[in-house]
Image (spheres, grey):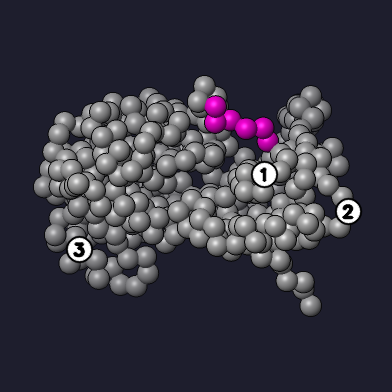
Amino acid sequence: MVQNLKAPYNLEHINSALRMSGFKKTTPFQKQVFPAILSGKNLIAETRDAAGIEITFILPLLLKQFKNTTSAIILLDTPIDTQQIEKTSKMLSTNNQFSNTIATLGYNGNPDADIPLLKKKPTIVIGHSDRIIDHIRRNNIIIKNIETLIIIIPQLQNIQNFEQNALFIASKLTQKAQIQIYINDLHNQLYELEKILNHPAKLLYTERKKFDTITKGVTSVDKEKTEQRIKSIIQEIKANPDDIAEYRKIFKKNVPIFLRSYFAAKLLMDSQGSSYKSARRVPSGNMKTLFVSIGRRRKVNARDLLKLFQKALDVKSTQIGSIKVLDNYSFIDLEENLSKKAVEIMNGMEYRGRKISVDFAKKRT
């Protein structure tokens, strides 16, 4: 049964569309974000460890009654994100008849190739930040008609120009437009973009504790020692600011603004040396390293893989060794008997809508 969605734009309507798409209940992240979207106010949502992120911002856009013109932009930075959003929108449209349409702009090549798509006046346009700006400047996208701007902040890579592009687009919107920012770690990543928002709703990861979504981290930090070290560094800076002037120039030139707190935290962590140890007991003995075909670009971290292997193998975290997550793949150490079981059970299994490969890692020659 396909549901024709022309009902009022409200939470009941969103939940109905979710059920028609096969989802029995909303995720904790969606319980936070849907009401904020419906309020029409600007929002910043922290996506760390969240489930159903793309559905959360795509579904309300598909349901909202826009004018017969391009009225919403989804601003992102990688083809992988584009493909995931396209896949999500197609899945939602399978059992729901949406009046709004989506056009995905090209990632590379001549922007003129997008013009036939834009002439059809799609309600929602998805594109790379450079590409969107190009069409705004050509008047192929009329910025004053944009009612919703969704900004997907990239994680730790490919963000040299993204911040400036997002700022440019956001600054051209009318005051009535809603800006939604989705970011992995709000505390550490967001700087200039937050300043242009008008009293945004902040939907934090820590606030999801009441939905039982918080898990303990896999590393421990000597908080007291770290705070003392920070205070000491600040005192040294105040005493002799000129001593670090040249370093400061190099820092500002080479470290993107979204990464500056990460960079500073990494330097601080390295300065602490061996005091940063795993809070999880790692097994010793005859270990085998497994290759896993997902990494950071699929928004996977070490905690995700730990939970995945725990559940699939029905083991405790103390039975799983070190985990290394790279851009496109990861490595995980397991006891020899568990590694064989993992390959048998998990190779080809579906994880977050995609089949993954789990196999013994090849030794470097």
Q: Residue 165 in the image: x percent, y percent?
A: 39, 51
Circle 1: element type:
loop
- Closer to the camera, 116 or 352? 352
The amino acid type found where label 2 is placed reads Gly
Q: Which dot marks residue 285? A: 2
x, y (%) of residue 247? 70, 48
Q: Vertical placement of 54 versus 254: above or below?
A: above
What is the x, y in percent for residue 32? Answer: 41, 28
Q: Which quarter of the image is occupied by the C terminus?
A: bottom right
Confirm whether the magenta stretch covers residue 45.
Answer: no
Is residue 42 visible in this depiction of the protein?
Answer: no
Q: Nearer the viewer, mark 1 or mark 3?
A: 1
Q: Secondary structure at mark 3?
A: helix
- Left or right: 302 with respect to 42? right
Q: Residues within 10 Å of mark 1 (few under 14, many from 20)?
A: few
Q: Few, some or many C-alpha atoms within 10 Å of disc 2 (few <14, some 14-19, many ≥20)?
A: few
Residue at 42 percent across and 42 percent down: it is: 53
Q: Which mark is residue 126?
A: none
Up/down of 317 relative to 351, above or below: above
Position of 89 with respect to 78 (left or right) is: left
Q: Answer left or right for 87 relative to 253.
A: left
Q: Magenta segment, which residues?
A: 212-217
Q: Earlier in the sequence, mark 2 or mark 1?
A: 2
The answer to which of 47 and 241 lies nearer the viewer is 47
Q: Say which quarter of the image contains residue 230.
A: top right
Q: Are marks 2 and 1 in contact (CB under 8 Å)?
A: no
Disc 3 residue type? Leu
Task: Find the residue positioned furthest to the right.
Answer: 285
The structure residue drawn at horizontal position 73% and vertical position 71%, both measured from the top left corner, is 362
Query: Upstream in the sequence, badge 1 or badge 3?
Result: 3
Res 314 label: 1
Provide residue 315's location: percent of width, then percent of height: 71, 43
